[in-house]
Image (cartoon, rainbow, N blue to C red):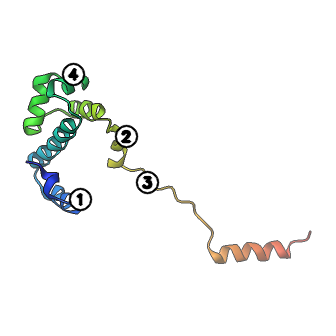
Amino acid sequence: MAYDLWMNTDQEVELLRDWPEPQVCRYLCAKVRRARQEAGETQAGFAARACVPLRTYKRFEANGQATLATFVQVLRALGRTQYLFMLFPSAPTTTVSASLDEKLKRLRLRSMSPR
């Protein structure tokens, strides 16, 4: 099923939130299959490039069954591992800025101090 052909991004996000795991796996393998096909690559050629046995890759594409290691190898072969950091973004670094009152207080103290 070509999920991305009939859904916009907002619809995909909503469905992915609610789908059971097998459906999410089928969705992911459909995305991989489409990327492979758009690149004009055969299953055998792609599996070899991903360093995944052909039988394993075919099983992944057919129903989304694969180990996490296999999925990472597939992502690497697609050139998509640079997006993995987005799964768990770092906490934003915030600089604690002084409040206006604190800044005024420092200015007053500075103006009162002897020079």
Q: Residue at x 19, y 25 (%)?
A: 47
The reply to whether callout 3 and callout 4 are in contact (CB within 8 Å) is no
As shown in the figure, which amino acid type bears the numbered disc 3?
Answer: Ala
Q: Distance between the Cα atoms at labels 2 and 3?
A: 18 Å
Q: Residue at x 31, y 39 (%)?
A: 80
The label number, if any, that marks residue 91 in the structure image: 3
Front label number (2 vs 4): 4
Q: Disc 2 or 3, which lies upstream in sequence?
A: 2
As shown in the figure, which amino acid type bears the numbered disc 1?
Answer: Thr
Q: Residue at x 32, y 35 (%)?
A: 79
Q: Disc 2 or 1, which lies upstream in sequence?
A: 1
Q: Distance between the Cα atoms at labels 4 and 1?
A: 31 Å
Which of 63/8 is in front?
8
**Residue pointed to by mark 2:** 82
Q: Disc 4 or 1, which lies upstream in sequence?
A: 1
Q: Quadrant of residue 14?
A: bottom left
The reply to whether callout 2 and callout 4 are in contact (CB within 8 Å) is no
**Residue pointed to by mark 1:** 9
Q: Quadrant of residue 111?
A: bottom right
Please state if 107 lies on the left or on the right of 3 as rendered.
right
The label number, if any, that marks residue 85 in the structure image: none
As drawn, 5 above or below 30: below
**The residue tagged with tag 2: helix, strand or loop?**
helix
Q: Quadrant of residue 65?
A: top left
As shown in the figure, which amino acid type bears the numbered disc 4?
Answer: Ala
**Residue pointed to by mark 4:** 48
* Residue extending farthest right: 115
Q: Residue at x 13, y 23 (%)?
A: 54
| Residue 25 location (% of width, % of height) | 13, 44
As drawn, 36 above or below 83: above
Please state if 51 lies on the left or on the right of 2 as rendered.
right
